[in-house]
Amino acid sequence: MEISKATRNYIYEMLPKSSGLEAEMEEYAKENHIPIMDAEGLHTMLTIMGIAQPKNILEVGTAIGYSAIRMLHAAPEAVITSIERDEERSQLAEENIKKAGLEDRFHLIKGDALESASQVAEKAPYDILFIDAAKGQYESFFNLFEPLVNENGIIFSDNVLFQGYVAGEKEMESRRFRAMVKRLDQFNKNIMNNPRFASTLLPVGDGLLVTRKCKSI
């Protein structure tokens, strides 16, 4: 079934509305052009997370701490290790986490995720891995951190359809942009076809790839 604009709007109207700090963060992100997870994709992920009830979560791409706060509320027994290389966003994330009263359950690693493996490993193993950072590096993030995820753990990769560009719905202008989209497309194909994982690519938000790490045979 092709989802029409009216149906999509209906779905969005059904989603719970944010309030308080979360609503403030959404408005701040919009005004300052900071990417945070789309509401439809976020609620899909949080629903799965609410069922799984993870104890230990790894997030690649903190931004201002919005997703971390939402995940900690969805999984009240979980702690999060989150990585962010942007200094200003790191500071905002820490401030927002403190406002939410969740600082005891949040550990921030400031720096490049691809250079933070040793710090990340200290908190392993993880029940959930959430990737929401540089799109052209998804394959590298996945390959680096997947070994730290428990068997039957879940890996969420956001923005894998990237505004329709990955599926060829829109024309790409710059060579650099085309290269990033090509890498994202290859990442999707590699994960979907890897027998070590059970994956589904959901057309929610900007595309959410949900992957379960299968038990070793």
Image (spheres, rainbow, N blue to C red):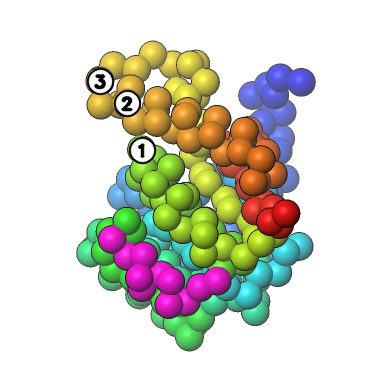
Q: Residue at x 23, y 64 (%)?
A: 87
Q: Which residue is mark 2?
A: 179
Question: Does label 3 or label 1 sit earlier along the sequence?
Answer: 1
Q: Along the line of sight, which residue is nearer the eye, 21 or 71?
A: 71
Q: Amino acid at mark 3?
A: Arg
Q: Which residue is mark 1?
A: 136
Relative image position of residue 78 (x, y in whole percent): 60, 75
The reply to whether the C-beta atoms of the residues labelled 2 and 3 are less than 8 Å apart is yes
Q: Residue at x 66, y 40 (%)?
A: 195
The reply to whether the C-beta atoms of the residues labelled 3 and 1 are less than 8 Å apart is no
Q: Amino acid at mark 1?
A: Gly
Question: Does label 2 or label 1 sit earlier along the sequence?
Answer: 1
* Helix, strand or loop at mark 3: helix
Q: Quadrant of the N terminus?
A: top right
| Label tally | 3
The reply to whether the C-beta atoms of the residues labelled 2 and 1 are less than 8 Å apart is yes
Q: Which residues are magenta?
A: 115-125
